[in-house]
Image (tube, grey):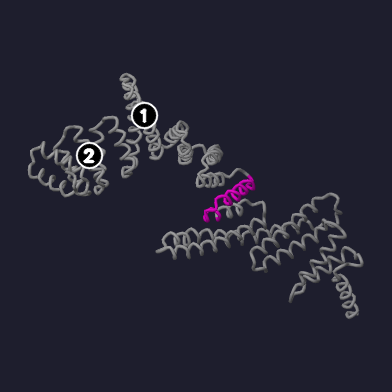
Amino acid sequence: MRLYKYIICFLIIASLAIPVMAVKLPQSAYLKSAKIALADTKSPRLDEAMMLLDSAVFYYGAIPEALFLRGNIYAEMAAKNPNLQKKIEFFKLMSDNYDSLTAACNNPEIKKDLKKDCRRMSDLCDSVRVKYWSEYYNEGVKGIEKIDKELSPKVKDAADQASADAAGQELNNFADSAKYFFMVASTVDNKDYRAYEGVGLIYDRLKNLDSSLVWLVKSMEHAQDTTSHLILNIAYAYIQKNEYQKAIEYFGKYLKLVPNDANNIFNVAICYSNLQEFDSSLHYDKLTMAVDSTIPGPYIDAGQNYLLRSQKVSDSIKFYAQQNKTEEAKHFTKMRDAILDTSASYFEVASRLDPSNVMVLEQYAVAKLVAGHYAEAGEIYKKLTEVEPDRGNNWLSLGDIYVQQQKLKEAVPAYEKATELNPGDGEVWKVLKDLYHNLNMPEKEKIADEKLNELGKM
């Protein structure tokens, strides 16, 4: 009897293994035979089972259990295949079958007896998705961490170009694998935005900003609600591409969700500055100051904004002076000085917030100097000589200010320090020679003469 049953079972399976089915079998026969093929503990016969299930779906339509088993087989194939691209293909087929299972279970035209196990199968599908999504997503996250903590620093700190090229190639190869881990995860569960974001971040590390934006936008589209950090990622990507108008658009979306984020309000100001839309830039500078008055950036940007405006007014002064239109020139001079005072007021705050910022001190000094506030400009240049004692231009500017103030004795040490740092500057030696002469310092005047003669500047 057992031999008889075995022969009957073998004949059924053998007949079903024929590529072109000559006989349409009952629906249950396809499913039972497929399960037998899958139940082989030594080596599940996946191809055989898949052929049976394909036939069942071909002849009888969307059978939930057949779709469920097909999805499981594709998941098994994906897990066993070492090729990441192939994994994506198999997981895509798995997801398609699981999605079809869900659709079939919700389809009122499918017979109820075929849907009786839908809840259990759907839960199992979700478990499979969660298992593989977590596995590959976590591998992708580990990849980003390795890129940031190990591979990118290795490229940056390379001793020579050959080492940098080798490290760069290692980073690219590793990032390619990390990218595929996220792609696998996004295929396993195409509704979770985080895997799409991961691909975008990998492309960002590779400086492939166009591809990064594609995936980051896709990530935002899959987020169930508006996710602020995704919007920021997109905005920053556009900044790296120097597409400031698009960056402003996404910063605007972000600020609707987080209106008091001072740093990103300031980022809008910077974007407008780069677009040379200075009125809009100043507006966002002031908004930033209102939200957080401790950030030096908006004060620096506003100071530079007014400094640029003063230069434009200076052109008008020059034009009217050349036309001998004294009153008009005076009018624009007053306007320029008022603008410079405003610029200096912002730089003054910035210098208090960031006292070691040399660029701020330099521009602060320029604003005071051009406006004719020599004493204040002198104090700023004194501070610059303390911060950067080996920079000759600071000492030279300090000396010039003392001369403007007729403080000739104070000017001498400043110019001498400038020549010490740049002994070949004949123009400074000429100024020193005149100062030595006017201050009745014949020995030093002789030294200046000798130096000028040596430089051929007599």
Q: Secondary structure at mark 1?
A: helix
Q: Are marks 2 and 1 in contact (CB under 8 Å)?
A: no
* 152 inside magenta stretch: no
Against 2, residue 83 (above or below) is above
Crowding at dot 2, Cα within 10 Å, few <14 / some 14-19 / many 20+, comes out as: many
Quadrant location of residue 203? bottom right
Mark number displayed over residue 375: none
Quadrant location of residue 318? top left
Q: Residue at x 84, y 67 (%)?
A: 32
User: In the rendered view, does 3 fall on the left or right side of 420?
Assistant: right
Q: CA distance from mark 2 to mark 1?
A: 26 Å
Residue 440 placement (x, y as % from top left): 7, 38
Q: Residue at x 48, y 65 (%)?
A: 166
* Quadrant of the frame with the C terminus: top left
Residue 231 placement (x, y as % from top left): 56, 44
Residue 63 placement (x, y as % from top left): 83, 58
Q: Secondary structure at mark 2?
A: helix
Toward the viewer: 62 or 272?
Answer: 272
Q: Looking at the picture, which amino acid does disc 1 mark?
A: Asp
Examine the rendering and report whether any part of residue 261 can be seen: no
Toward the viewer: 294 or 1?
Answer: 294
Mark number displayed over residue 398: 2
Q: Which residues are magenta?
A: 202-224
Against 204, residue 24 (above or below) is below
Q: Residue at x 36, y 26 (%)?
A: 316
Quadrant location of residue 79? bottom right
Toward the viewer: 310 or 238?
Answer: 310
Crowding at dot 1, Cα within 10 Å, few <14 / some 14-19 / many 20+, comes out as: few
Q: Looking at the picture, which amino acid does disc 2 mark?
A: Leu
Name the residue beneath numbered marker 1. Answer: 315
